[in-house]
Image (cartoon, rainbow, N blue to C red):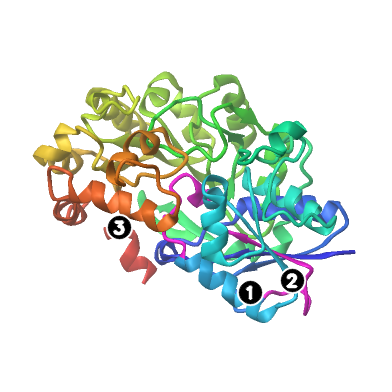
Amino acid sequence: MSSVCLVIPSNPFDQYFIQLPLDAVTAAGQLRAAGHSVTIWDQRLQDAPAGGDAYDVLVVFTAIADRAQCYPLDLDPVRAAVERAVTRFPSARTIAVGPHGTHLPESTRADLAVDHIAIGETDSATVGAVADVLAGVEAPVLCDRSAPHNLLDSPDPRPRPYPNIPLDAFAFPAFDLVPTADYTAEVISGGLPLPGPCGMVLAARGCTYGCTFCHLPFGTRMRNQPLDRVAAELDAQQAAGLEFVFFLDYVFGINRTFYGELCERLHGRGLGWVGQTRAEIVLKSDVSQWARAGCQGMWLGAESPAIAGTGVHKRVSEEQISQAVIKLRDAGIVPFAFVLMGLPDDEACVSGRLVDWAAGLPAWFGINQLYLRPGTTLYDQLAPAHNGGRKPTTWREVQEVTRHYRATYPTDLDAQQARLTELPNYLGNAIVPAAG
């Protein structure tokens, strides 16, 4: 029997929440079902792993499920996690999984000083890579090796991701390997968002919308989990003491039949939950059904009142955003809005109108400045122009692309962000004091 340790690095987001590493517990369940001894070392919560004194394989997650869509460009925290793990277990083979290696494998392997990079959706790539390494595969980039030989033998074959394990074929997540009740997210108490104990569920993977700035680690095809499996995951988290969960689904409600049946399963559980979706989905949905099923908060990808004119393939109007926020509020669901600063040709951001718009939203909002991330269409379009006419090949160059993009943006994004953070409905003003 082989022993495997899955390593979760610390990161700057820890100051807000420490969310359950859902893809790690899913991979761990599958590895354990295959006969391996598995430990999860969540360095955000644990000084040392609770498993054995030695491991055959260490798998480091560069961005767990809740951070994969907006994965950070800075690998320093992950490198620190690798160094800490290797110092403790120097004989183990090391693998990095996550969006960084999937998009820039050689640079990621060099930056992290790991033996292997695994390409693909994180939980499936973890399972495939561990099997390959234990079978003696020496390749630095681990991927689907079933491609035709003429492709594999070419001078620069494009790595193909490990195939996704069908959602109905995954073993049950190994929630018992993590301190489940210690994970946190925004929960609703007395109508206000506060950091509190919170689990995580991914009922459906994927997003069929093609926003060019958005990284989609689960692809563009919707894949629904069996509802019995979703219910069982909720049972396990409630049994661990959690009475609130976050639905990581990127477009909650997009499939009316599936989500209608899910809400029927949620009704009467005494479970509170927050999800995320799009304004036009809210306007087409019976959100009162969501509220009866326990929904207490819902995030909208609002971005900007002028986003429809920014050319990023998101045709959502200012009026639709406003109507969706009001519809959620009137149903008793606390509305949240993602605000994204620095979109190309965003007249609201350039003029400063974005601040007044955010101030007038009857919703809590979170903010971020635009990152140009590998794996997005917008990065492919803009990165060469900010990197001397060529695509970056290292993460240092990728970081410089975003720095240069922001520096040449026609307004001071840092100054505008400072104005936004002073607004009373900025989420950070609700959660940081309570978290401290």
- Vertical placement of 234 versus 55: above or below? above
> What amino acid type should be assigned to the residue bearing mark 3?
Gly
Q: How crowded is mark 1: few (under 14 residues within 10 Å), some or many (20 or more)?
A: many
Residue 81 placement, left or right of 377:
right
* Residue at (54, 40) in percent of width and height: 217
Q: Nearer the viewer, residue 135 or 73?
A: 135
Among the two numbered marks 1 and 2 on one chain, the one whose residue lies closer to the N terminus: 1
Q: Which residue matches tag 1?
A: 85
Residue 316 on the magenta segment:
no
Q: Which residue matches tag 3?
A: 428
Q: Is mark 2 on a helix, strand or loop?
A: loop
Gap between marks 3 and 1 measured at Cα? 32 Å
Residue 361 % position (x, y): 22, 38
> What amino acid type should be assigned to the residue bearing mark 1?
Ala
- Which labelled disc corresponds to residue 135? none
Q: Residues within 10 Å of mark 3 (few under 14, many from 20)?
A: many
Residue 138 % position (x, y): 76, 57
- Which labelled disc corresponds to residue 92? 2
Residue 298 placement, left or right of 2:
left
> What amino acid type should be assigned to the residue bearing mark 2?
Ala
Magenta segment boundaries in residue numbering: 49-75
Could you tell me if the residues under marks 1 and 2 are in contact, i.e. CB atoms within 8 Å?
A: yes
In the picture, residue 154 is in which quadrant?
top right
* Residue at (47, 56) in percent of width and height: 185
